Amino acid sequence: MRQQREAQHRRAASGEVTGDAGITSPFEHFIVCGLPTDADVSGVAASRTEAKRAIIAGAEVHVTAPKGNRRDSYKSAVGETYPARVLWCYPEDVPVPIDDVASFCFPHGVEPQLLERTPSMSGLNDLVYSQRYARADDASFVWALRNQNLEGVEGSAGDERIETLYGVCCYARELVRRRPGMIAAAESAASRGDVDVLTRGSVTKHPRGRYLIAADRCYCLISKVPFFSMHFEVLHGMLGVERLERIRACAEELWAEDYENLKTEKTAGSHGTDAAPLVGRKLSYEEPADEDPSADTGASGDASPSDAGSRRMPPTDEELGERSEALRVLCEYRALAIPAPGGEVTFSPLPDLAPVRFVRRVPDEDGAADVDADGEEVADGGDGGDGGDVDRPGTPSSGEQRGKGPDDPTWQSPAVYRSLAARRRRVTGALGSRDSVDAGPGGVGCAQLWMTPAEESVHMETWTVAALCRTLSLDNVLTALNSVLLERQVAVFSPNLGDLCAVTLALSTTMLRPLRWRSLTLPVMPMTERMTSLLEAPVPFVIGIQRKTNEVRRLCQELTRVNVYKDEVKLGGGPQPQLPRLKELAGVLRPLHDAAREAARGGSYRGPVAEPSERARTAARAFLEAWREYLRALVANLRAYAITEVSAAGEKTSILLKDTWVDSFSKADRSFMRAFGETQMFDWYADVQLRA
């Protein structure tokens, strides 16, 4: 795999590799974003009283008082924010194809916070040793940039090829003046420093004062595959290994330090000096000051920046793995073969790290050609190659009769009430027609593939819908979906980036299947001038915004505003027609929504948004399937309202009689269906159905 990857890098450098090369690795880039160690920033105190106390105590760092109440964080940051920078990127020789990628990881910049080193060191130890990245619901999120091929791929019109870059991010709060361990190890590998230096401790002196500055750093995997569960597990594993290395380094330093030296430092009168050994100082990998630098000419401590830059070469994966177990996990993850649809892979890079098991689910449905006009399943050669033998969730079994029109909607008896065993797909093929396998060294297969809309939705459906039901009431969910189906401009607001990305993805992707959003969607929008101008674009969009600043509030007056943080939806730009048979739909969905909301909110602990409980996943899937039955009923029987013309060459051209189709609905529902029939997503879906 390593030789194959290096050959790919050479082709990329020479311009031979384009987007048509497919996807051969679980991720494309890994970046660390945040504030550099030499950043001149000020830390915001928890309160004005603490800020005043720190200034009186003669804090060695810049201190600012909070500008407002933290409960109003949806409006603006409490303290001063600073633009984030990319501190390190892997692989170093492949540029990230996104301008200002750090602004996606920190949409409103980085907000440094003041940290007091108390005698008990409770706050400092919590910062150094905590696992907030794996426990907090706002420390993990996803951003996405989509580039879809509207011409589709070879096969059918519905097999649309999409190429999306997903940013899978985890926040870890760290001291600003301390380099992350992975970066220090990578720099040591790049300078070809002696690995033995890593075992001799470090002399990078962190600030010894009473007050320090801490801020979030973002560890982000940029990938073309939406395998979010596997991405987050690997990220959490890497950060966990980094945490253990830091704790181990601290313990080694405690034993290595001479007791008399510690006693001498205590008598020096410096505030908090006794806390110094407990802060991991092994993460700089620089030459100890008490040794002769000339004894190790390979070390990076005595090299000038100009010399280092002139002879610096990107380190190999083996060199990175030798210096850091976290980097070893990263390198081996990039070499991992992507499983085939329905296949399974187990990733176990370290003996002491719990294996990551991932099953690549086969899409439950294909939005392009799901059923024909008579209710029979259409085999389209899609993912898994299962065709009509697959018992698709949401599709009536052979003993059931699909409804013939809106007067007999199938969603009144949704597929969610069938047994779970009957819903499972029987995967008989290894790869679909759009996948090919290249054997790597040793015969290891690496699937080169494209993501289809159906598979993209599969990998995000449960956790996004669980977050949608947890944060919004059923009435607000239906109001927001009403606007999305009519392709209104929708802005989603939440200071919690985890909830923000989940709700935005649910509205623009998961809840629309078998339809497909055809315009702009940004789960997390950076608040740069160029990005903010998108709010004035005359196109439909679904955009997630972290903070409702005064400028954003002005630009969003005429938009549909989904305020996730207070469970509210406001309609801008005039009234909109209601969903057909809204009261009956709400009656079917309400118990399912209540169950999903209770399951997602249950318990005192709520972890990362992409990792809901199994109970929450099951309840969210039930709600989603019932909603999709309703959507399928709205767009059923399109062929019954189309005319087909056959040319002399035998080519068929079908035209949908929209007015006749709209008139088939009840008078109260025609206003919505007429507006829905003019949307891009309906035109695309109707075209696919009529050409299938």
Image: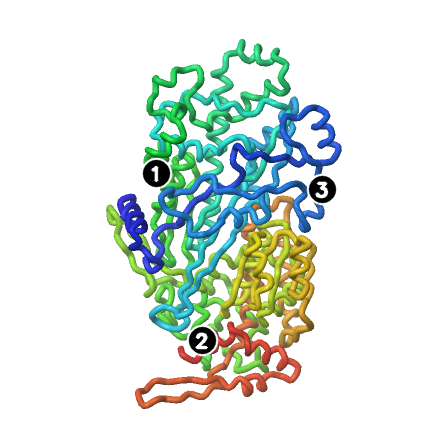
First in residue order: circle 2 vs circle 3: 3
Q: Secondary structure at mark 3?
A: loop
Q: Amino acid at mark 3?
A: Lys
The image shows residue 450 at horizontal and vertical percentages of: 37, 60
First in residue order: circle 1 vs circle 2: 1
Q: Nearer the viewer, residue 212 or 530?
A: 530
Task: Name the residue tied to disc 1.
Answer: 314
> Which quadrant would the C terminus be assigned to in this image?
bottom left
Task: Name the residue tied to disc 3.
Answer: 67
Q: Secondary structure at mark 2?
A: loop
First in residue order: circle 3 vs circle 1: 3
Coloring applied to the structure: rainbow
The image shows residue 609 at horizontal and vertical percentages of: 56, 50
Farthest residue, direction left = 442
- Crowd around label 3: few <14 · some 14–19 · many ≥20 (10 Å): some
Q: Amino acid at mark 2?
A: Val
Dividing the picture into quarters, in which one does residue 361 lie? bottom left
Vertical arrangement, residue 580 with respect to residue 562, above or below = below
Vertical arrangement, residue 456 with respect to residue 404, above or below = above
- Crowd around label 2: few <14 · some 14–19 · many ≥20 (10 Å): many
Task: Name the residue tied to disc 2.
Answer: 371
